[in-house]
Image (cartoon, helix red, strand yellow):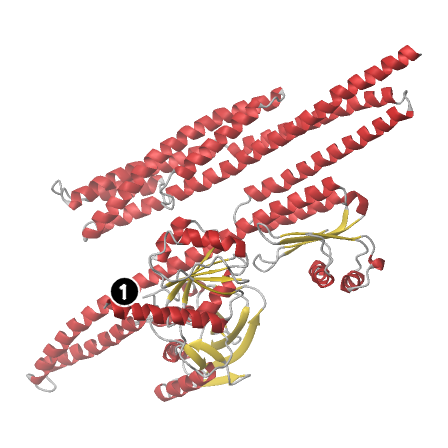
Amino acid sequence: MRVIAALLLLGAVVAALITIPQMSRNRRWIDDTNRAMMRYALAQHALQVNLLNARAGLLRNYDPLNADVATTRDSLALLQSVRTSAPVRDVVTSMRIANARQEALVEQFKSSNALLQNSLTRFTANGSRESGTYNYLSAQILKLTLDTSLATVRDAQTALRRMTAVPEGTSGAQMLSHARLLVRILPEIDATLQAIRAIGMEARLEQLRVALNEEAEARTALEHTRLIALRILTLLFLASVIAILMLQRLHNRELRAQAASERLSATIAIPLIDTVHQNFLARAQDAVEHLARHNGARRMQLLIPDFPNAPCFVSPPSEPDDPWLERLAAASDADEAWDGDLVVVSDMRGQTGALGRVMRDAGVKALVMLRTSDPFRVLIGFEPEKLALVLRPDHLAGLASALVAIAHGARREVLQIERDRLERKLAQARRMEAIGAMASGVAHNFNNILGAIRGFAEMGQERTRNGSSSRRNFDEIQAAVERARGLVDDILGFAKQGRTTKRVVNLFDILEQTVRLLGASLRYEAQFTLAGENTHCAVLGAEADLQQVFLNICNNAAQASRGRAVRIAVRRQPLAQERHFSHSALLPGKYVVVEISDGGSGIDPGIRRRLFEPFFTTKPGGTGLGLSTAWEIIQGHGGTIDVGEATAGGARFSVWLPEVEAGSGAKVPGDGARVLLLGDAGQLSVDEEMLAELGYEPLAFPLEVELSCLRAAIADVDAVLVASWRAEAIPIIVERLQTVLDGQPLLVAAPTSSPWAIANVFTVLAYPLQPDELAARLADLDATSRSRSREEA
């Protein structure tokens, strides 16, 4: 028996020596494979985005593409170097073959795209020097850059064949040469991009994930079998051996729980990494439901405070919409219940402070809350069924890892939303600036021509008899000249938008004056009624421009009403969250709304979409500048115009303008100066709105914006403002900025005094921003700039 016992003991020791290292190897194997797979997924997604950016001309440097290709190659090499089963090796081999094909296509794309961008640049440069016969060809080439279908290619080829031969060496010849190259290469590039997408690396990555999960389960099952054998052997030994067995069993359970937590983190992280724009909310809700099941939560809530509209994700989804987590977090702050980033309450009956009261009101018996602020603020709280299970280190580590993955996804989504908003705003500003400059030049030149026509017509009138046919012709010329001068005035009014100074005005007074003017000019044609719940509605604006807006809209309403009354109503309207209107959206805040309703037949939906386009009109003899001018004025005032149907069936134009506190009506200090604002993504809109209210034109970017974007933006601004809660990140941002500043003054706003501020380099002020302090600092910079200009002169 002793020999048998010794043999059994030896067998148990040998089994333990074999099993324990194998567990460690399996754990490293899971870590290595998961890390390599996630690196590949991130690089593959970045590669697709960078290819599209390069095709659109937004990415001229191919270093990001090379880095993405190298990362995918290295990740697959790492996966192939790890010992895996035959199915996994087959999938990895298939992915490496497909990846090699993808790399070849990427290299082909880079060569073709470089040639494309060069030809487009030269084609545009030559096209700017040519006009007339090349306009149709330029239009077809522009259309081809957006659509490379067969029909579009044929149209471009037809346009090329129609072009007449030009001498070699001229800009026209160069333009035709580049046009032929573009017609050939554009379809090839798009075909290359389609071929890259057709490889289907996403599906292969999913096959790899399934194969790795199956092998992980098989390895776990093998470990389990070995452990059963070890338990059978160790049960025959002394109590000490039984104790060792029990410790090993506990260790094994922790490993399985840790593997489950790691798999959960991967299950949550990969969809959030691969999520497309505007699909984040659905993926985050799925993540919360996964976390609730994994932690055995009766109910769970997750908050992202800095995300637009601060969404609250709940599990189960049928739970009433009660933001109890927000109240519990506030109560925890009041009671100082946070232990770092964790709050655990095992029983509400032991709580006597604010947290206990809120738990009783919300019906929460036990509570676990966890938060993170890096890279984005996220808060999660739930009521567990088994608190002891949740408090195990592996569960808490898995929960923290999942929370960080959600935070990364939220941060990326917020940056993408902000980027889209800024791109739309910048594109609109450039478009209107170009239209305004062109309109102003045309109007001034046209005025000179009209002056000559009017002079000759007056000479003709003096030399002809009243009543003669010649005199009537000259009278018609004079009338046409007056109509043309009215059109020129409209064009000049449209071109000067954004150059007026704003101050605090009473909108109701402007409307009363507008009604009096309309009553005098349209006495027998229309009636206007003005009603308002409050006769004092303060807004920040240019009085003459706002009156022009209401005159233009009311004149259109009078013509549509055909004698019926036009109703004008004024009211205050707060917005608790972002709201979308017929042509744009507004952020939360307080607004003054002016509703102008006519008694006409309404506006066709097809026409409604184009109402504010410059030079678009449906009225005979109209210029198409009335409503477009009104739209640009209201946009410049931070508002919008909503077009809908009136109660009586006509059209309703609702003008929304930000409300401000009534003041003395003093001039706004900013006077339209441009300020580049760098700040936290969740706070950008608030700081941007403050700059706009002070009379400055803000151009906002998140702190993480690439330096290449700032180089183009800084050249057009008068000052740069860095404002953030993260004082530790500001020195890095300032160091980056100083490499691209071109003499523009730099201000920094931080929560506390900053010892790293360098004298005579930038100005430091408190954060959050205070309007009075910010206005004073910006005014000081403006005065210093004017002084320097006088000294240089």
Q: Amino acid at mark 1?
A: Ala
Report the side of 466 relative to 499 (left or right). Answer: left
Q: Quadrant of the N terminus?
A: top right
Compared to residue 135, the image places residue 334 above or below, namely: below
Residue denoted by label 1 = 437
Q: Quadrant of residue 574?
A: bottom right
Q: Residue at x 46, y 39 (%)?
A: 48
Q: Quadrant of residue 363?
A: bottom right
Q: How many marks?
A: 1
Q: Nearer the viewer, residue 126 or 163?
A: 126
Q: Quadrant of the C terminus?
A: bottom left
Report the side of 544 relative to 128 (left or right). Answer: right
Residue 641 visible from this viewpoint: no
Q: Residue at x 39, y 62 (%)?
A: 760
Q: Residues within 10 Å of mark 1 (few under 14, many from 20)?
A: some
Compared to residue 594, the image places residue 338 above or below, namely: above
Residue 600 visible from this viewpoint: yes
Q: Nearer the viewer, residue 706 or 645?
A: 706
Residue 291 at x, y = what percent? 70, 45
